[in-house]
Amino acid sequence: MSIYDWHHTSWDLRSATGLTALLPVGAIEPYGPHLPLDTQNRLLDAIARRVAERLPGDVYLLPTLPFGQSGAYAGFPGAVGLSWRTLLATLTDLGYSLLQTGVRRLAVLAGLGGAGCTTALPRENRIVKTAVRRLNYEHPDLDALWVQPLTVATPPLEELFPSARDDFHGGEVVTSLMLHLWPELVRLERIRDNNLDHVPSQKAAILDAVPFSTLCPQGVWGRPSQSDVERGAAALEAIVAGTARYIEETFQEMARLKRHPG
C-alpha cells in the first residue's frame, strides 16, 4: 500500500494501481471566538491523511478543497463560500478529471458532520450528495461516495461526549479535537470569559430558513466549555476508524451491486 499526494510527481503515480482518491471538502467559516476560521479544513486534513493510512491498496490523497457552501454563515467576519452551482460544477469536474487519470474510486469527505446526523443527507455541503450521484450515473466506470467523518465515528461520539447531540458548530467535539491537534490555536480564555455555551431550543433544520447569526450570534451552537484534550484524542481515533470502515464497506457494496444488479 502506498499513499500519494500533491508532493509526489506525476511519474511517481505511474506505479500506482487501483487508486482510491480521497477528496476532503471543507469551509472557511466562523467557529466562535475561540477557534480559527480554517478549523474545518485543518480537521479534515488530519482525518483524511489518517484515513488514507488505513485504506487497503494505493490512495491518492488530494488537498482539501478549502471553500464549500457557507451561506448560513454569511455576514460573519471572514466567512467565504461558494454557490451550490459552483460547488456542484467543481466536484463533477474533479471527479471526471480523476477518472481520466485512471482513478476508479473516489471518496469525498463532505465536511465534518456530527453526532445525530445520518448517512442519508450531509450536514454541510449538501450539494456533495448530488454531485456524487451525478458522477455515478454519468460515469459507470467510477465508484463515488460521500461521507462525513464525525457522523460515522466508531464508537459513536455520543459515547465519548455527554453533549454530542447538542454539538452542532464550534462546541465540545470540535474544540476537543482542536485541543488535541493544535492546542496553541484554541483561545481558552475566550471560552471562560464569554460564556460561549449556547444550545438553541430550535432544531438545526431551521437554518434552512434563517441565518446562523440569528440563533447563534457568537458563532457557537454547543458547549465548548466541556471540551477535553483526552476525549479529543479518543474522538480522533474513533472518527478515523469509522470513516475508513465506512469507505471500504461502501465501496465493496457498490462493486457488488454494479456487478450483480438486482
Image (tube, grey):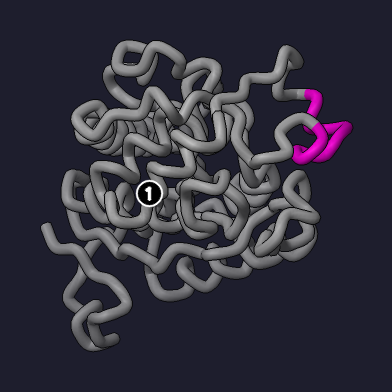
Where residue 61 appears, as percent x and y from the top left, is 32, 63
The answer to which image quadrant residue 22 occupies is bottom left
Please give left or right for residue 13 compared with residue 172 in the image.
left
Q: Secondary structure at mark 1?
A: loop
The residue at which mark 1 appears reads as 186
Task: Name the residue at 80% across, 25% down.
Answer: 206
Q: Do we see residue 158 in this rendering?
A: yes
In this view, the residue in front, 157 or 107, is: 157
Q: Quadrant of residue 87?
A: bottom right
Q: Main secondary structure of the magenta part?
A: helix
Q: Residue at x 55, y 18 (%)?
A: 166
Q: For residue 29, what is the image quadrant?
A: bottom right
Task: For label 1, count other residues whose C-alpha is less than 10 Å away and answer few (under 14), some (14-19) or many (20+).
Answer: some
Whether residue 212 appears in magenta in the rendering, the answer is yes
Magenta region includes residue 105: no
**105 or 123, which lies in front?**
123
Q: Is residue 222 above or below residue 7?
A: above
Q: Position of residue 10 (x, y in %)?
A: 29, 86
Along the viewing direction, whichever of 61 and 234 lies nearer the viewer? 234
Q: Residue 210 vs residue 230: left or right? A: right
Amino acid type, mark 1: Val
- The region drawn magenta spans 206-214
Whether residue 143 appears in this view of the structure is no
| Quarter of the image with the N terminus in it | bottom left
